Image (cartoon, helix red, strand yellow):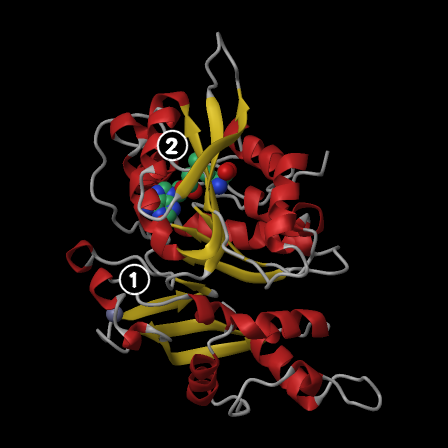
Amino acid sequence: MLPTPSTSHASFENIYEPAEDSYLLLDTLSSDAESLFLTKRFGSDEPLPVILEVGVGSGVVLAFVATNAQVIFGRSDVAALGVDINPFAAKAAAQTIDVALRDLEVKPITLGTVMSDLTSSLRSGQIDVLIFNPPYVPTEPLPATSAISDETMSNSHEVFERDSKLLELSYAGGVDGMETTNRLLEQLPDVLSERGVAYVLLCAQNKPEVVKTSIRQWPGSWKAETVGSSGKTAGWEKLCVVRIWRDVVP
Amino acid sequence: MKILTLNFLCCARKTCKSSPASFPLHPKEASLEQIETDINALFIKNILPRLDWEAMKTLTIELGLPALPTEPPSPEALEDPDSGEPSQTLKDLHQLLMETSIESGALRCGNCDHEYAVKEGIANFLLPSHMV
Ligand SMILES: C[S@@+](CC[C@H](N)C(=O)[O-])C[C@H]1O[C@@H](n2cnc3c(N)ncnc32)[C@H](O)[C@@H]1O
Ligand SMILES: [Zn+2]
């Protein structure tokens, strides 16, 4: 087992605390099957891969991927960028990554974190590996996304309200838990490079089979397969990680 | 944020995406920070093909940093042919891409003129709802 990055500096009052879903992503990305797939696709004979984690939260997943790039991609020269809508998460994740890399002799390239609604601030076709552990819990339909400020507040009631909103953003997925994930899926063909691969975490209520079937119908022969799962109860996987990609034409 | 990060970002407005003027974003009143790190020649060599060279040249001019060569350097130009030591070009690139970051200021879109704030090294691309 590869070590999990420390997130002890992060405040879980307003940042998503690493949980089963985060760990499923770590295990899936570092599994033999995925490391093999990723090393074949992005190994040291290939151009340097750029990794983006959307909804980076505490940074635990991206820090893990960056520190273990040698195992996962067969090379240490990868570039890693994180985005989140939550200003506290953007700050904490940057720190998580720095701390995780501190003692590493050959460090990957850190591109830091930015505050962004999904991939809206990214140039087309630049991302080779995209990771998303979305807000996936079915809830009431979501309001339009809006910025939440991290300005210092003196009123504890205001602070509490803001922090609840931020935590809600980390889990509330709207109808079928898919509202935010669907917006991200729509962005994939634009944001991913031709060799790009996305790993998206889904829960059973998101209807993963329906999601995969619809991706396979996108123009341009897209593939979607479950490559990791956890919490099996009575034949149902509670959580799964879906890999989304196209075959690279040599 | 590193100058290198700007190579991957553009204006977040949907209507700007297709305009070439939405990339690169133009730093404004940027306060820069230098953090020394060890040179890794392999990394610089491998990141070069990922760069939009014209955009990088524009950024260095706008930030008042040492000018980049007109054309992207060949891998051979990164080390001294006799000693194998890092060449000046490699040192400049390392400093620009790996060591220089924007601590605070703003990033302006060349298409819509919207400015994105950078605070404590983190750029904020969230738009007010009427601009999305
Ligand atoms: C389930 S948490 C995952 C956090 C972390 N990646 C992990 O695995 O532990 C979902 C994250 O997505 C972020 N998020 C929600 N909506 C977003 C949006 N529209 N754009 C960017 N990030 C968003 C939340 O702030 C939260 O950090
Ligand atoms: Zn713009």
Q: Chain of mark 1?
A: B
Q: Amino acid at mark 1?
A: Ala
Tell me if residue A127 comes above or below residue A219 in the rendering.
Answer: below
Q: Residues within 10 Å of mark 2 (few under 14, many from 20)?
A: some
Which marked residue is nearer to the observer: mark 1 or mark 2?
Answer: 2
**Where in the figure is residue B129, as x and y percent of width and height?**
19, 54
Q: Quadrant of residue B108?
A: bottom left
Tell me the number on the disc at residue B12: 1
What residue would you read off at disc 2?
A212
Q: Residues within 10 Å of mark 1 (few under 14, many from 20)?
A: many
- Cβ of mark 1 under 8 A from ligand 2: yes
Tell me the number on the disc at residue B67: none
Q: Residue furthest front?
A: A250
**Where in the figure is residue B24, as x and y percent of width and height?**
38, 75
Q: Amino acid at mark 2?
A: Lys
**Where in the figure is residue A51, as x and y percent of width and height?**
53, 54
